[in-house]
Image: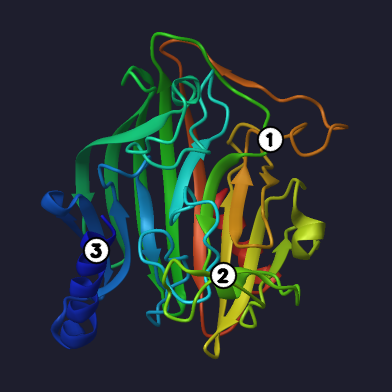
């Protein structure tokens, strides 16, 4: 799969940077079912791809770029790059799942082809299977991709049906991804458990890590799997939330309307932010935002972050549907300010 994805990303990159001058303006959604992906092009340049390889445990948006063409997502394990952390191989691109969905763990999965699991553990894992592309819509201001998926156990029994609409938009230095996901419980009652392991998440490029000055396990200078103990000198990430708290220590586990993560990469000042919607269960979401590059907002976690918080278990009965909405923004050419993010939050929640 890795070499396959490298080829796919390389071919799009060649198209983007060689042919963009003659590319149509606006946002174009380009399905490629043979390659099991959908490319999202902004003025002919790759913004992101919705990918659903057969051996990945969930569909994800991967990779994600700024308007200048700078990648913000970690490459490992699909396309490892130098000095990345080779931890948590289930952290790929941007995704939505959860660690406790009934008896199943959709978060801490790694590969459907793994033979290293016991049968008991295998029975507790869940996968999200892409089923079909429902529709696509191109436009000068936004592009829309709507897809269907099933949340299944190891027997392929569906526990939840998913319909997700991605709305891709942006202007100038800004790129935006609105995710609207409707989940419908099937024949069993489904309880989203109160755990920190969830739910809308992005695994960020290594420059977005917090600088600790301590050696950590990184890929070597060529990006090969050989692991070396070194200091991530490029790390300069800074979390900030809507309540004014900063760094992992101030943001992690706290409820917030939005959380941002900013860093400089090759002289480019970039901010990525996740914005919650007031109609989501568990609003405002708690932040499962880690200094090692896991950026996640969790609408199902409460006591899982702090034992003093009230327990929050979200229950869906058979046939019941629930809709979730989030906004991801990517700003370049200068960090996003609180006022700018607050305005986007207000517009998104209007």
Query: What is the quadrant of the N terminus in the image?
Result: bottom left
Q: Nearer the viewer, mark 2 or mark 1?
A: 2
Pointer 2 or 3: first along the chain: 3
Q: Is residue 343 left or right of residue 222?
A: right
Residue 305 image point, x, y percent: 76, 39
Evaluate if marks 1 and 3 touch, with contact meaning CB atoms under 8 Å apart: no
* Callout 1 secondary element: loop
Checking the image for residue 301, the label placed there is: 1
Pointer 1 or 3: first along the chain: 3
> Residue at coordinates 43% horizontally, 47% vertically from top-left?
179
Residue 31 image point, x, y percent: 17, 54
Residue 294 image point, x, y percent: 59, 56
Residue that lies at the very extreme toward the bottom in this rendered image: 267
Quarter of image, res 341: bottom right
* Callout 2 secondary element: strand
Alpha carbons under labels 1 and 3: distance apart = 36 Å
> Residue at coordinates 38% horizontally, 41% vertically from top-left?
111
Q: Nearer the viewer, residue 317 or 226?
A: 226
Q: Is residue 243 visible?
A: no
Alpha carbons under labels 2 and 3: distance apart = 21 Å
Pointer 2 or 1: first along the chain: 2
Residue that lies at the very extreme toward the right in this rendered image: 308
Checking the image for residue 218, the label placed there is: 2
* Callout 3 secondary element: helix
Q: Which residue is mark 3?
A: 3
> Residue at coordinates 20% horizontally, 83% vertically from top-left?
20
Q: Is residue 269 left or right of residue 249?
A: left
Q: Nearer the viewer, residue 7 or 248?
A: 7
Which class describes the residues within 10 Å of circle 1: few (<14), some (14-19), or many (20+)?
many
Which class describes the residues within 10 Å of circle 2: few (<14), some (14-19), or many (20+)?
many
């Amino acid at each position: 799969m890795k070499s396959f994805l490298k080829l796919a990303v390389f071919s799009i990159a060649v198209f983007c940077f060689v042919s963009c001058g003659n590319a149509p303006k606006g946002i174009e959604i380009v399905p490629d079912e043979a390659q099991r992906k959908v490319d999202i092009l902004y003025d002919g340049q790759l913004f992101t791809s919705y990918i659903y390889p057969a051996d990945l445990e969930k569909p994800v948006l991967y990779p994600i770029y700024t308007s200048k063409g700078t990648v913000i997502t970690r490459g490992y394990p699909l396309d490892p790059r130098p000095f990345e952390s080779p931890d948590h191989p289930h952290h790929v691109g941007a995704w939505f799942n959860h660690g406790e969905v009934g008896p199943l763990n959709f978060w801490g999965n790694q590969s459907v082809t793994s033979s290293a699991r016991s049968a008991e553990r295998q029975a507790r894992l869940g996968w999200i299977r892409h089923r079909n592309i429902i529709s696509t819509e191109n436009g000068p201001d936004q592009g829309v991709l709507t897809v269907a998926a099933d949340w299944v156990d190891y027997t392929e029994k569906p526990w939840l049906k998913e319909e997700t609409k991605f709305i891709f938009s942006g202007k100038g230095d800004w790129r935006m991804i609105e995710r609207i996901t409707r989940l419908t419980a099937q024949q069993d009652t489904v309880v989203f458990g109160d755990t920190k392991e969830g739910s809308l998440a992005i695994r960020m490029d290594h420059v977005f890590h917090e600088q600790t000055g301590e050696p950590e396990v990184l890929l070597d200078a060529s990006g090969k799997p050989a692991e070396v103990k070194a200091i991530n000198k490029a790390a300069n990430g800074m979390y900030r939330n809507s309540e004014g708290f900063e760094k992992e220590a101030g943001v992690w586990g706290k409820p917030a309307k939005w959380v941002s993560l900013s860093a400089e990469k090759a002289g480019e000042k970039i901010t990525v932010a996740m914005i919650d919607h007031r109609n989501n269960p568990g609003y405002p979401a708690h932040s499962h935002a880690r200094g090692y590059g896991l950026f996640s907002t969790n609408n199902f976690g409460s006591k899982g972050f702090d034992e003093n918080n009230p327990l929050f278990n979200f229950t869906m009965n058979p046939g019941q549907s629930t809709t979730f909405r989030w906004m991801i923004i990517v700003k370049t050419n200068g960090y996003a300010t609180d006022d700018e993010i607050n305005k986007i939050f207000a517009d998104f929640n209007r």
